[in-house]
Image: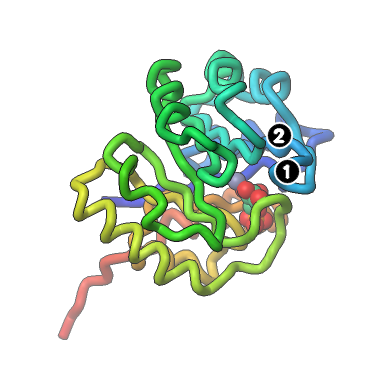
Amino acid sequence: MSHFVAPSLLAADFRRLDRAIELVNTSEADWFHLDVMDGRFVPNISFGQFIIEQIAERAEKYVDVHLMIEDPGRYIDSFARAGATGITVHAEACTHLHRVIQQMKEAGVKAGVALNPHTPVAHLENVIEDLDVVLIMTVNPGFGGQKFIYQSIPKVRQMADLIAVHNSRAVIEVDGGIGLQNAQKVLEAGARVLVAGSAVFGADDPAGVIAQLKAIDTNPVSYV
Ligand code: DX5
Ligand code: ZN
């Protein structure tokens, strides 16, 4: 099964958002990754429903909304109405995670849960069967352009095992510091969706980087 590439628009030039949208639409990318930050759950503040609605109207691909906000249950319906295909909430931001997952299902969006680097995989053991997406943060959330945390690779493997044991349909998404230098390793560990912000939008040829990320072969044919 091949993998997906999800450029994070956080790293795009917002003076020309139309160009970034066009780039994702016309490239080999699979998902738009949109990072919502509230200045509470993470130190930074980014954008909300208003901007997402503008993007989603023009997006011809899956709209992946990553909520880095406290108590995200308050906003599931409004982000669904703004045009999200899937919403991902942070486990650490939800007192009643099970309820928030049901809210996402009722709103008709794919249900995702993200884990910060310190949160153990086992935290999702009792909800994994309800999830479409598990997002393993490979940096501490809040900013683009940070350094990939290498301990994330065994964590992706542990999550792949948990998903297999529970026969869950969930796909593993990785987010933070992902680029051509580590994408193969995370894919081999079991990731299916690669989020990439600065590796794509910081490049001279963003569509070329997306194509290279898509072309990574995780099952190289052995000739011996
Ligand atoms: C970080 C965000 C990421 C960010 C990734 O908190 O969740 O989606 O945009 O950016 P890079 O790929 O530059 O680490
Ligand atoms: Zn993100």
Residue receiving disc 1? 12
Q: Secondary structure at mark 2?
A: helix
Within the image, what quadrant is residue 36 found in? top right
Q: Amino acid at mark 2?
A: Arg
Residue receiving disc 2? 19
Tell me what residue is drawn at x 52 percent, y 30 percent: 63
The verdict on label 1 being within 8 Å of ligand 1 is no
Tell me what residue is drawn at x 50 percent, y 73 percent: 151
Left/right of residue 1 with respect to residue 155 in the rendered view: left
| Relative image position of residue 23 (x, y in whole percent) | 62, 38
Tell me what residue is drawn at x 31 percent, y 51 percent: 2
Camera-side residue of 174 and 151: 151
Q: Secondary structure at mark 1?
A: loop
Within the image, what quadrant is residue 133 found in? top left
Q: Give the numbered dot on residue 179.
A: none
113 over 211 or under it: above or below: above
Tell me whether circle 2 and circle 1 mark residues in contact (CB < 8 Å).
yes
Question: Hey, which residue is sitting farthest top in the picture?
Answer: 81
Left/right of residue 130 with respect to residue 198 in the rendered view: left
Left/right of residue 140 with respect to residue 123 in the rendered view: right
Question: Hey, which residue is sitting farthest left in the picture?
Answer: 224
Camera-side residue of 173 and 201: 173
Camera-side residue of 74 and 50: 74
**Earlier residue among tags 2 and 1:** 1
